[in-house]
Structures are given as C-alpha cells and as structure tokens.
Image (tube, rainbow, N blue to C red):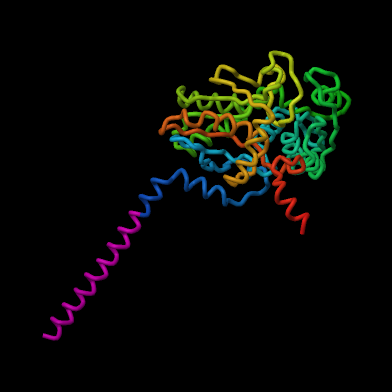
C-alpha cells in the first residue's frame, strides 16, 4: 500500500514537472515568434551596440525618428548626423576613398585633397587620421566656424577660398583644390562634385538601409540636393525596388539650377545645385522643390524646441518643404526625410537662439 502511494506521488511530481516544462517551451516559442516578427528592427538595434575596430566600421545604421507633422501620413527623419564624424558624408567619403585605394589611385603616404562645404571635408579628415593620409580641404568662406574647427581638429589642412557665383571660377574652392592637386606630388583628389561613385555610395548603403528600416513601406523620399549623390543614389535604389516611390530633391532658391543660370548668394550650407555634374541622375527624381534661406532657417527652432531634433540648415530646408505639403499626404503614406547633419555645427550662427532666455540671464 505504501509502495502504491509513493508511486502515485512520483507520478504526480513527474506530471507537475512536465507541465512546467511545457509552459517554459510555450513561452520560448512565443518569444521566438515575437523575435521573428521584429527581426528587422531587432537586428538594427543589435548593430547599434556592436563593438567596432575603428569609427569607420560604425558608419551607417542611423535611426529613423518619427516627426509629428500635422498630417494623416507618417513622417520619419533619417538622423544621418549620428554617423561618426557627424554627417551623411561619412558614407560617400569612405566609399570614394576605398574605391580609389582598390583601383590603385590612392596609395600609402599620399595626400587626400578635395573641395567641401564642410561635412565632406570633416569626413575625409577623419578618414585620413585613421588611415594615415595627410589631408588638404579647400572650403568657401561661408563655412560655419564649427565645421572649420572640426576639419582642423582631425589634423587636416584647410585652405579658405572666396564665395564665387560659379564653380568654374578660378578662385572657387573647387578650382583651387584642382590646382593644389596638380602642384602636390603623390596626391589624390576625391572630387566629390564630379565623381559618379558619389551616387553609387548611397545606392549601396543608404538606399538598402531605408528599405530595410521601413520594411519596404516607404512611399516618398525627400533629400537635399547639392552634388546629387544622395538624391540620385538612394533614388535609383528606391525606384528599382518600387517605381511608385516618389523621390523629391530640395534645392536652394538661389542656386544655379533654380535661377536658370543666374545664381545669387545664399546662406544654407549643404544644398544647392550650382553646376552640371555626372553625379546627378534626374531620371530617378520625380520633382525638385526650392526653399529659401528664410524658409529653411524658420524650421530650425521648431525642430529643436518643439520636436527635440537639433538639425542643420539643409535639414531645415527639407523639413520645410515636407511640412508645407504635409496635409496632402494619405494615411498610408510613409515619408522619409534626410537630416544630413546636426545643428551643433552651426550654433555660432545663432539660428537657434532663444533671445528671451538671454535677456533673463543677463538681467540677473
């Protein structure tokens, strides 16, 4: 009798253990299902926390952040200023340098040379510091103090040039960069403004990343246009993925293209189609909209103080163009905007100044 009771007790314990194991397996299966449903976003989060050998390995996988415009559609800002040197130019600069190395055009001990409105120069300076190249960057006098300091902080040499109406002017920062290249032995000019690989860089990196992050739901893509590398490269990838996706570029209102060959000075850095270049592929662009300095700058305090996004002027131009038509988008539309760099690179220009706060502090 005692044996039977003991045996029954053993069976009860065994049944209890089986029940617990079944519950654990059920939880594990449910957890696995959740992971599978969120595979894309999970992978991106994991990538964010990966350990890298150099900052170059950390380029890309920047986040999409929702922007609450008054509209039935969904808007995301691609925060490219979270790349290692602070802008989307990390992607194209590294790609162009790597391609030059692989083609034997850039060798150890060479000097990297190029013209830049700032961010490309910062990216090249960072790359040069890591790879051991000397770097010379020519810039226009309208460059922000912060970007100028950043280029020099990485150890690069800066050559300041006057602002010119056309890039072909012998005094333009592009023309000066070409001259320096001719006079410098063992040097290589990246030539971002006329190198078609500029667009290829974004086709192979930024384009696939946006499709992955949005799970292919993107319907509209907005990006500033200068060299045309981002707009053309991403645009080509998106159109190949789904021809219905709209690709819209944002140009400065006073640029060469916008004024039909009669450019006027403008203050926004990082956008402005000021020359004809093989980098720009208009066949993948649905429209190009123009934004003035005042319109671009007007968005910066709104983005910073209402939405917590401290973006640069070119991002302000993109945001202005999008919010102006926000209510026209449909509920199922998913709009991705490129925010190319951070407002931290322009603080001395007082685009974000809260004058009231300064007055209060000065009166204490």
- How far across and down, in percent of the image, does residue 281 sit? 60, 19
Q: Residue at x 47, y 28 (%)?
A: 328
Q: Is residue 17 visible from the viewing direction of this image?
A: yes
Residue shown at 24%/71% (left/top)? 16
In front here: 28 or 139?
139
Residue 2 appears at what percent x and percent y? 14, 86
Residue occupying the far right of the picture: 183
Placement of 346 over or under 326, stated as above or below: below
At which x and y percent is residue 22?
27, 62
For the C terminus, give its image quadrant: bottom right
User: Would residue 277 be counted in the magenta stretch?
Assistant: no
Magenta span: chief secondary structure: helix
Does 18 appear in magenta? yes
Question: Toward which corner of the image does residue 162 lie, by quadrant?
Answer: top right
Q: Position of residue 7 (x, y in %)?
A: 17, 78
Taking the spot 80% from the left edge, 42% from the top edge, the residue there is 149
Left or right for 33, reference 279: left
Q: How many marks?
A: 0
The residue segment tinted magenta is 1-30
Residue at the left extreme of this rendering: 1
Q: In this rendering, does residue 132 appear at all?
A: no
Above or below for 84 versus 271: below
């Amino acid at each position: 009798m005692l044996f039977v009771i003991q045996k029954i007790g053993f069976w009860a314990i065994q049944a209890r253990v089986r029940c617990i194991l079944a519950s654990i397996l059920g939880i594990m299966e449910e957890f696995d299902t959740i992971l599978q449903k969120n595979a894309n976003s999970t992978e991106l989060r994991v990538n964010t926390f990966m350990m890298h050998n150099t900052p170059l390995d950390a380029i890309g996988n920047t986040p999409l952040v929702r922007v609450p415009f008054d509209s039935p559609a969904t808007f995301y800002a691609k925060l490219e200023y979270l790349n290692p040197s602070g802008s989307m130019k990390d992607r194209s600069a590294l790609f162009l340098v790597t391609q030059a190395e692989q083609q034997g055009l850039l060798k150890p001990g060479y000097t990297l040379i190029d013209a830049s409105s700032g961010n490309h120069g910062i990216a090249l300076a960072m790359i040069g510091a890591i790879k051991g190249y000397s770097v010379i960057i020519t810039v226009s006098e309208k460059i922000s103090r912060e970007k100028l300091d950043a280029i020099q902080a990485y150890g690069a040499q800066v050559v300041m040039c006057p602002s010119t109406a056309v890039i072909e002017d012998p005094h333009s920062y592009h023309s000066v960069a070409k001259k320096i290249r001719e006079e410098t032995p063992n040097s290589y000019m990246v030539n971002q403004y006329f190198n078609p690989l500029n667009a290829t860089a974004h086709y192979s990196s930024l384009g696939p990343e946006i499709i992955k992050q949005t799970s292919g739901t993107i319907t509209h893509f907005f990006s500033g246009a200068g060299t045309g590398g981002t707009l053309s490269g991403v645009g080509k990838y998106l159109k190949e993925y789904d021809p219905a996706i709209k690709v819209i570029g944002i140009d400065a209102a006073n640029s060469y293209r916008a004024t039909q060959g009669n450019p006027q000075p403008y203050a926004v850095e990082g956008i402005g189609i000021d020359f004809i270049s093989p980098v720009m592929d208009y066949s993948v662009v649905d429209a190009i909209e123009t934004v003035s300095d005042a319109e671009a700058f007007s968005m910066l305090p709104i983005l910073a103080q209402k939405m917590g996004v401290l973006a640069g002027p070119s991002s302000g131009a993109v945001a202005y163009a999008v919010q102006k038509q926000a209510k026209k988008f449909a509920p199922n539309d998913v709009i991705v905007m490129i925010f190319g760099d951070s407002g931290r690179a322009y603080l001395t220009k007082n685009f974000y100044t809260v004058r009231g706060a300064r007055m209060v502090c000065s009166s204490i």
